[in-house]
Image (cartoon, helix red, strand yellow):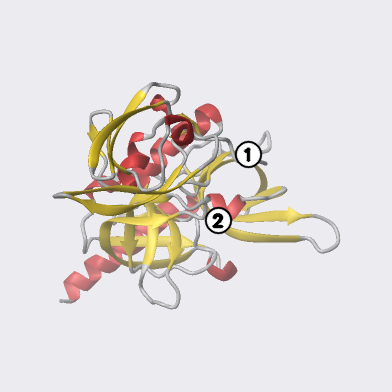
Amino acid sequence: MDALLDAYSEAVSGAAERASPAVVKIDSRRREGRGRSGGSGSGFVFSSEGLTLTNSHVVQGAKRLSVSLQDGRTRTATLVGDDPETDLAVLRIEGNSDDAPYPTVELGDSATLRPGQVVIAIGNPYGFQYTVTAGVVSAVGRSMRSQSGRLIDNVVQTDAALNPGNSGGPLLDSRGRVVGVNNAIILPAQGICFAIPIDTAKRVVAALLRDGRVRRSYLGVGGQTIRVGDGTGVLVTNIEPGSPAANAGLVDGDVIVRFNDEPVRNVDDLHRVLTEERIGVPSKLGLVRAGAARTLPIIPAETRPRAA
């Protein structure tokens, strides 16, 4: 038993030692002058040039951003881009000409995570910098709503303790590789915490570095999952005026069961198919209306960029 505990301790401490130099405290100033306000969170550097991943809500509305590194350096940072739909953002640390390369952390693979696997969280809860907590993966494949209201797929649930200020910090595997971006806690519950899977983050980062935002298509419907025959579909509960759905003639009470050749069993399925590649492309919706099957042509539009 002592050998097992020693091995566990060594895994946690080793992972924390490898990753901690790349973990940063992020301070955001949302209002200057009298009555100035701000907040703080966590992040981690994933490129030696200072590119840093964090949560969108940590930097949302910030007029000024600064990061503090474990080696004592404090630097200003600029926002490369953020995606409120997945609650992720990329910053670039502004370095001095004589700055050494920034320490980085290795990005892992969240697809291989299993319930019961040991994970380690590092962050700055309540300003206590480089706080390390450990636990296990409680579940994978959870769904969680971002602050924008969109469902995020395949969220990792963990019992590694998170508190305000942990947001944006890394969730590590036992080898010190990032497998998630710490995101949320459920209050007043204890031991129910969530992280955005790093595989999702990799896709979002690529889009933010390329375009400064994540482009998606949309239909303009609100809906909920209901049972239809032997399966399920998305019941249309509201339609945005002037949206692709409105232009296509969808009405409240329609049930979407297919998008082109892909089944739509729930709202998550719709989110998954409405990618950048669908923007402006004539498509077909399979519907059930008043008990009868119908096919409706529709042209998804690009989701409007969030106002600054």
Circle number at residue 69: none
Mark 1 falls on what kind of element?
loop
- In the image, residue 140 above or below residue 97: below
Horizontal side of 145 relative to 258 (left or right) equals right
* C-alpha separation, residue under disc 2 versus residue under disc 1: 14 Å
Vertical placement of residue 106 versus 169, above or below: above
Q: At 65% from the left edge and 56% from the top edge, which residue is drawn?
A: 27
User: What is the three-letter code of the residue carrying label 1?
Assistant: Asp
Task: Report if residue 91 is visible in the image.
Answer: yes
Q: Residue 158 location, x and y as percent?
A: 33, 64
Q: Residue at x 21, y 61 (%)?
A: 115
Residue drawn at (44%, 49%) of the image:
150
Residue indicated by mark 2: 70
Query: In the rendered image, which quarter is residue 13 located in?
Result: bottom left
Q: Which sits in the foreground, 279 or 158? A: 279
Q: Nearer the viewer, residue 274 or 205?
A: 274
Q: Is residue 236 above or below residue 285?
A: below
Out of 144 and 88, give the one closest to the viewer: 144
Q: Quadrant of residue 17?
A: bottom left
Sequence-wise, the earlier of marks 2 and 1 is 2
Instruction: Specify the quadrant that holds the C terminus.
Output: top right
Q: Confirm whether residue 102 shows in the render.
A: no
Residue 7 percent location from the top left of the image: 22, 66
Work out whether 284 lies above or below 113. above
- Identify which amino acid the numbered label 2 is placed on: Gln
Q: Is residue 220 left or right of residue 233?
A: right
Query: In this view of the protein, which residue sits in the foreground, 153 or 103?
Result: 153
Residue 93 in the image: x percent, y percent? 61, 41
Residues packed near mark 1 inside 10 Å, few (<14), some (14 to 19) or many (20 plus):
few
Q: Which residue is mark 1?
A: 99
Report the quarter where the N terminus lies. Answer: bottom left
